[in-house]
Image (tube, helix red, strand yellow):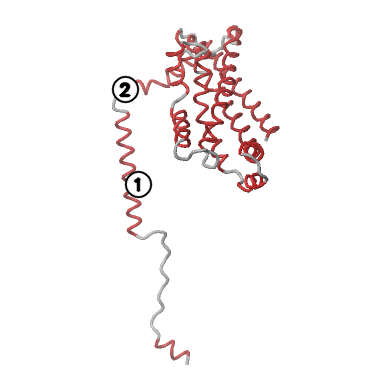
Amino acid sequence: MDTVNSRHAGPAVAPQPWRRRTRRQEWAVFLGWLLALCVVVWCFRVMTQDTIWAFVSDAPRQVADVGWRMLPPDWAFIGELWLPLWDTFNIATLGTLLGLLLAVPVAFLAAHNTTPSRLVLRPLALTVIVASRSINSLIWALLLVAIVGPGVFAGIIAIALRSIGFIGKLLYEAIEEIDARQVEAVTATGATGTQVMAWAVVPQIAPALAGISLFRWDINIRESTVLGLVGAGGIGLKLDAALGTLAWPKVTTILLVILATVALSEWVTARVRQRLI
């Protein structure tokens, strides 16, 4: 019976090959990539319309010439860098501490689970965080040098203003991710708002706060090395002077000192994080 039925059955339909997209979707993807390529080509033409390509082709020779002029480093100049390097360290450290003191209350006001007012205070705190993160440390330093004059103080304030947004953003996100059950448990004991904050919220965010502060201090060490280029103190003043007089061996010495300082800050940060977190 099965044999008879199989004789009258039509030919077997071959299985269709699997396709990730339909033909229409493939054409849409192709046209999308083609449009993106056209936009990139147009942007490249706009950005390079004033480029002098003779200078670009001559750049490797100029780089090699400057490289030879920078060797060997002027090691006798290193004695003049210790005080500016100390100023750089103070700018980064004091700026980080000041930014931390200002960022912590801003973060508590920005977090939706700790802010006293979601309609007024939270938007204001978020505005402060966004404004701080939108302006680079060099721009803050340039503005502050014009307001308070050149020197280390302008650099400290610039680093602090830049740090508020970084610390505040990461910290308020950490506050919003705390375990609400611990807060409810402490609240159920009849604790006041301050006690709930001290015993339920702060212990949960303390490791994150320590890590964020160390990370920001490490970043500020790097940023403070160039603030002197706009007159905000530190080793950047020496770098600007050496570049201005084309003293390339001194420039090499300064860059090597900056490299060693950044490497040391990386090592210190890693060791402290291992102990605290």
Residue at the spot of label 2: 52
Q: Say which of 247 and 3 sits in front.
A: 247
Q: Say which of 161 and 228 sits in front.
A: 161
Of pointers 1 and 2, the one earlier in the residue sequence: 1
- The kind of secondary structure element at disc 1 is helix
Q: Residue at x 59, y 21 (%)?
A: 93
Q: Say which of 215 and 15 sits in front.
A: 215
Q: Tell me where residue 107 appears, x and y as whole percent.
A: 53, 34
| Crowding near the residue tagged with mark 2, few <14, some 14–19, many ≥20 C-alpha atoms within 10 Å | few
Q: Are marks 1 and 2 in contact (CB under 8 Å)?
A: no
Judged by depth in the image, the label closer to the viewer, 1 or 2, is 1
Q: Mark 1 is on which residue type?
A: Trp
Considering the image in quadrants, where does the C terminus appear? top right
Q: Say which of 159 and 99 sits in front.
A: 99
The CA span between labels 1 and 2 is 30 Å
**Total number of numbered labels?**
2
Q: Mark 2 is on which residue type?
A: Ile
Q: Residue at x 62, y 27 (%)?
A: 266
Q: Tell me where residue 247 appears, x and y as whole percent.
A: 49, 8
Q: Residue at x 59, y 30 (%)?
A: 215
Q: Which mark is residue 222?
A: none
Residue at the spot of label 1: 33
Q: Tell me where residue 250 appears, x and y as whole percent.
A: 53, 10
Outermost right residue: 275
Q: Tell me where residue 100 appears, x and y as whole percent.
A: 57, 27
